[in-house]
Structures are given as structure tokens and as C-alpha cells.
Image: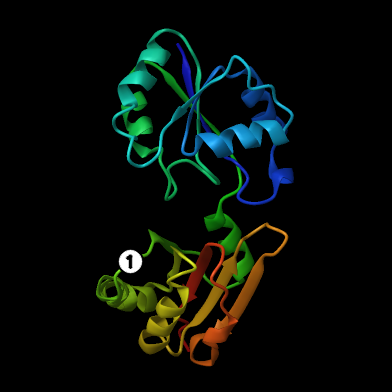
């Protein structure tokens, strides 16, 4: 039986690779990747020879279209590695459909754990809660974003849930402005460019947070905490 390997890749710091990940990357011949250019750059930085390796684009648009090709390789006895641009496959990134497909076959699935902005933010925030709700990338339109947060506000408070989200740098000021209106009494942690040299970490009560703190570069990960007094 062949194996589909879900490979976690660094989200910013190349030194966050594991020995197990390096071994799997060296032995693999076939990769399905979210960004082929960045996948080749990753192999180059890790000093892994990409000659003889087949790298197949597998982004959001091509995800379902490439499943037949992925299954054909597994059926032919080839192990396949699945890499996203950064982080863990299936966490706000491609990978879910591949896992669903392979689960229905005789083939194996292995995960090569790696860094995730989700787990990094939960560790860094330091908020006193052991339950969290991950909503991924927030809706682009403000009304949709408002509806989402209003829908979960009462549950957040009653169950003391942390709400974790990803946001684009071009929308972060608008989003924080909205959260200040909806959750003035809440605490928020925001991490920009996590693990990178120029990462920015912010902890604040929302009513005290100044919008000028935000830089329009690099993805933000947020953790919202509505504390019971």
C-alpha cells in the first residue's frame, strides 16, 4: 500500500523543520503543492536535490481536479507528499479533499507535524481558556464578518471559548474597528508574520487598541477572548 504524507512546512522560519520532515522530503518522488515556486525554493533552502522529483500544483482552484491524478499515483505504488505554502495541510489550506478521498481507499495516510499559525497563536496569547473555536480566514465583506461574530458572541461568553481567526493585512484595520464596536470589553491577541524576523505581537483590551499599530504587510492571526468577570 502506498502512503499520502501530509507534510507541515515552516510558516516563516526555515529552522522550524523537523528531522522527520527532511527524511520524507528526500525520499519522496511526487509532491502535490499549493505553490510550486515556493515548494522548489523550500527544497533548495533545505539543500534537497529536486531533480527527479515531480511537483504538481494543488491550490484551491485545482484541488478537486487533481484528485484523480493523486489517486492514480497511489494506486501505482508511489508515496505522495502534500505540502501547502506554509503550515499544516487542511488548516485553512488545501488538503481536506485529498484526505477524504484516501480514507475511502486501501492506502495509508501519515502526518508529518509542523508549525501552524493556529497553534502558535494559542500558545502565545496566554488567555485563560482551554477551549477554542477556529473560524479560519474571516469573510471579506464587513456585513458577513459582522454576522459571523454576532452569531458566536453569546456562545463565546457562556462557554468561555477563545475565537481564533486569520485576517489579511489589507483588511485588519477594518476588522479591528468592527471588533472594537462588538467586543469593546474583550481582550485580543494579534500576531503578524509569526516566527519571522519582523514578527509583531500585540496584546490589548479592544477598547484600548489603537488602529495605527497595524502594518499593511503580512498575514495576521487573532485570538479573541471575552472574559467572564
Q: In the current view of this chain or complex, which residue is farthest to the front?
A: 37
Is 217 rendered above or below residue 41?
Answer: below
Residue nearest the observer in this picture, 153 or 44: 44
Direction from residue 228 to residue 69 in the image, left or right: left
Is 98 rendered above or below residue 197?
Answer: above
Residue nearest the observer in this picture, 43 or 227: 43
Residue 1 in the image, given as x and y percentages of width and height: 45, 11
Q: Residue at x 45, y 8 (%)?
A: 77
- Which image quarter: residue 193? bottom right
Q: In the current view of this chain or complex, which residue is farthest to the top?
A: 76
- Which image quarter: residue 16? top right
Q: Residue at x 55, y 46 (%)?
A: 86
Badge 1: few (under 14), some or many (20 or more) residues near its Cα, within 10 Å? few
Residue nearest the observer in this picture, 123 or 76: 76
Residue 144 in the image, given as x and y percentages of width and height: 26, 70
Direction from residue 197 to residue 27 in the image, left or right: left
Colour pattern of the rendering: rainbow
Specify whether residue 13 is in view.
Answer: yes
Specify whether residue 104 is in view.
Answer: no
- Which image quarter: residue 226? bottom left
Q: Secondary structure at mark 1?
A: loop
Residue 49 in the image, given as x and y percentages of width and height: 69, 22
Is 22 rendered above or below residue 169?
Answer: above
Is 171 rendered above or below residue 87?
Answer: below
Residue identified by numbered label 1: 140
Residue 223 in the image, given as x and y percentages of width and height: 50, 70
Number of labels in the image equals 1
Q: Residue at x 36, y 24 (%)?
A: 102
Amino acid at each position: 500500500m502506498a502512503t499520502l504524507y501530509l507534510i507541515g512546512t515552516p510558516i516563516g522560519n526555515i529552522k522550524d523543520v523537523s528531522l522527520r520532515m527532511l527524511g520524507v522530503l528526500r525520499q519522496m518522488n511526487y509532491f502535490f503543492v499549493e505553490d510550486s515556486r515556493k515548494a522548489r525554493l523550500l527544497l533548495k533552502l533545505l539543500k534537497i536535490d529536486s531533480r527527479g522529483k515531480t511537483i504538481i500544483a494543488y491550490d484551491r482552484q485545482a484541488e478537486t481536479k487533481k484528485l484523480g491524478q493523486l489517486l492514480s499515483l497511489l494506486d501505482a505504488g508511489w508515496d505522495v507528499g502534500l505540502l501547502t505554502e506554509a503550515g499544516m495541510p487542511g488548516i485553512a489550506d488545501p488538503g481536506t479533499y485529498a484526505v477524504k478521498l484516501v480514507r475511502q481507499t486501501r492506502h495509508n495516510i501519515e502526518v508529518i507535524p509542523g508549525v501552524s499559525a493556529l497553534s502558535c497563536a494559542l500558545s502565545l496569547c496566554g488567555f485563560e481558556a482551554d477551549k477554542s473555536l477556529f473560524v479560519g480566514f474571516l469573510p471579506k465583506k464587513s456585513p458577513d464578518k459582522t454576522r459571523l461574530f454576532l452569531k458566536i458572541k453569546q456562545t463565546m461568553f457562556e462557554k468561555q471559548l477563545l475565537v481564533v481567526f486569520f485576517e489579511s493585512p489589507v483588511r485588519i484595520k477594518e476588522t479591528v474597528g468592527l471588533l472594537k464596536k462588538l467586543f469593546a470589553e474583550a481582550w485580543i491577541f494579534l500576531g503578524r508574520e509569526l516566527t519571522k524576523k519582523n514578527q509583531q505581537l500585540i496584546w490589548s483590551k479592544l477598547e484600548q487598541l489603537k488602529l495605527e499599530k497595524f502594518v499593511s504587510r503580512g498575514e495576521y492571526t487573532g485570538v479573541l477572548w471575552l472574559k467572564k468577570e
